Structure formats: C-alpha cells, structure tokens
Image (tube, rainbow, N blue to C red):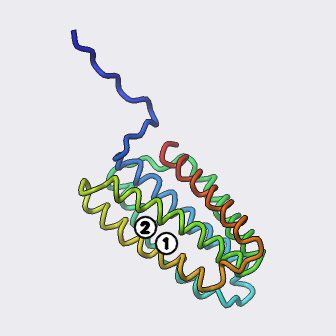
Amino acid sequence: MSRKSRPAFPGTQTPDNIEAMIRVDHAGEYGAVRIYEGQLAVLGARGSKAGAAIRHMAEQEQRHLKVFDKLVNERCVRPTALGPVWQVAGFALGAATALLGEKAAMACTAAVETVIDEHYAAQLARLGDKDTELQKTVEEFRAEEIAHRDLAIAHGAEEAPGYRLLSEGIKAGCRLAIALSEKI
C-alpha cells in the first residue's frame, strides 16, 4: 500500500519557491526605501555631500519597489505580514546611522547592499531558468545594488567610526529580516 505525502505546513518553503522570492524581495525593497527616507530626513536637512548619492540610490529603490509591487499584484503573492515592522525599522536604521554622520549612513548602505548582493545571487542560482522574467529583474536589480554598495564605499563607508561592528550588526539584521520575510 503506497502512502500519500502530506501537504507542506503553511510557511514551509521549497528551495525554488518563487512566491517566497517575490515576497522577500518586495519586503527588502520596501525596507531599502524606508532606510533611504530615514537617511534623507536627517542628512537632507544638513545639505550633506552624500545627499545627492543617497537621493539617486533612493530613486532606484523606489523603482525596484514599484516593480515588485506589480509582481506581487500580478502573481497574487501574499506580501509579508511584517511590513509595519520594516516600515519603522527601516526608517529608524536610516535615521540612526545618518545621525552618526555621512560615513555611518554610507556604512549602512554598504552593509545592506552586501547582503542583498548575496541574497540575489543565491536566488539566481535557485531560479536557474525557471522564471526568466523574475531572473532578468533580479539580475538587473542586483547590478544596481552592487553599484550602491560601491558608491557607499567610495563615499567613505569603511571610514565610519566602528565600521566593522556597525557593518556586521546591520548585515546580521538584514539576514534575519530576509529569513523572516520569506515565511511570514
């Protein structure tokens, strides 16, 4: 007698779960928009040298978010239930690092974008050629995120006081946010 396999528990993800990929990418782009809004709320008022670079990166993140908004709606993907948390946490992270100075704000960007580069690379490996539309989107956005990281480093991210501690703390938070947003 053959045994039927049980359906997966809610929240269980398979390695190539496209819905989870879209959900977490949507959440990540939302978080990035909020980080830049927090940074600009502090540095924009100061006439910061980094302000133009941050505004440019923020515009690209807004575009990324619009694309993932569209994918969430077209593919009927449930967004993360943690949106309200990321709204507050993203803005707070951006504002707090900006209050520490331009280099700390750039250290935040470099740390976040390093994790996003790794995350998008892993998604591309899992996607293979299963979903060429999503693959092209992720490849394009990954290239822009890498450019954001490089721009942040060029603006002195690695010169921020306590850079290693700040960077590693932000990276750990980003990895946790990714894991939670895929499932919740």
The tag on residue 66 is 2
Figure disc tally: 2
Identify which amino acid the numbered label 1 is placed on.
Gln
Question: What is the quadrant of the N terminus in the image?
Answer: top left
Q: Image height check: is 68 above or below 108? A: above
Identify which amino acid the numbered label 2 is placed on.
Lys
Q: Nearer the viewer, residue 143 or 168?
A: 168
Going by the image, does 96 lie left or right of 146? right
At horizontal 39% and vertical 66% (from top left) the residue drawn is 67
State the image coordinates of residue 22 (x, y, percent, origin top left): 40, 54
Q: CA distance from mark 1 to mark 2?
A: 6 Å
Q: Residue furthest left?
A: 1
Pointer 1 and pointer 2: residues touching (CB < 8 Å)? yes
State the image coordinates of residue 17 (x, y, percent, origin top left): 36, 46
At horizontal 63% and vertical 56% (from top left) the residue drawn is 172
Residue linked to disc 1:
62
Going by the image, does 148 lie left or right of 75? right
